[in-house]
Image (spheres, rainbow, N blue to C red):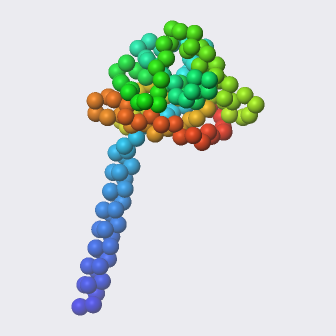
Amino acid sequence: MFLPRQNRIRTLVVASLLVMLLATTMGCSASKYGKLTPDKGVQQAFQSYQILPNHKYYYRGVYSRPTVIAGISQNYTMNLKMWVPIDAESKDFKILIDRVSLQGMGNQIEPWGLIISDQQGNKVGIWYSALRAAAVEVNENRQIVKLYPITRAAIGEQR
C-alpha cells in the first residue's frame, strides 16, 4: 500500500514539472517585445545619409545631442512623445546623423545600424545609435507603443 502512494506523488511531481516547463516555453515564444538586430547595411545607409523609401525618420534626445535616429516603415505609426520627427530631405537629417556618429568619438563605442523587428519578427524599421538595445512593442493596429532605448551601451564588434 505504501508504494502506490509514492508512485502517485512521483507522477504528480513529474506532471507538475512538465506543466511548468511547457508554460515557460510558451511564455518565451509568445514574447511581448520585439528586438533590434545588427545590420551592417543599415549602418552604412545612415553613414552615407541614404534615405530609405517609404520610411519616416525620428530622433530621440535633444537636437544638440541625439541618442538615436530611427527610420520607421510607412506600414507602422509612431506617436511616442519622446521621438521627434525629422524631415529626411532637410539639412537637419545629416546634422543629426553626424551628431549620433560623434557619440563614439574618443572611446570604443561607435554607432550601430540595427533592424527594428516587432514581436512576430516583422521588420518595423531601422535604428542608428551607440545604444544597441531597446524595448520594442507594436500593437495589433501596427502602432509602435514602445520604443525605449536601454541606456547602457555595449562595447563590441558588429556582426
Can I make out residue 31 in this image?
A: yes
Above or below, 25 relative to 86: below
Q: Is residue 31 left or right of residue 89?
A: left
Task: State the residue in front, 4 or 142.
Answer: 142
**Residue visible at 34% across and 21% down?**
75
**Residue visible at 38% across and 27% down?**
79
Q: Residue furthest right?
A: 106
Q: Name the spot of residue 65 as percent of width and height, x first.
A: 62, 27
Q: Name the spot of residue 73 as percent of width and height, x first.
A: 40, 21
Classify residue 45 by image quadrant: top right
Q: Name the spot of residue 70 as percent of width and height, x first.
A: 49, 24
Task: State the residue in front, 77 or 80.
Answer: 80
Above or below, 56 relative to 128: above
**Residue visible at 68% across and 34% down?**
109
Q: How many marks?
A: 0
**Residue visible at 58% across and 30% down?**
67
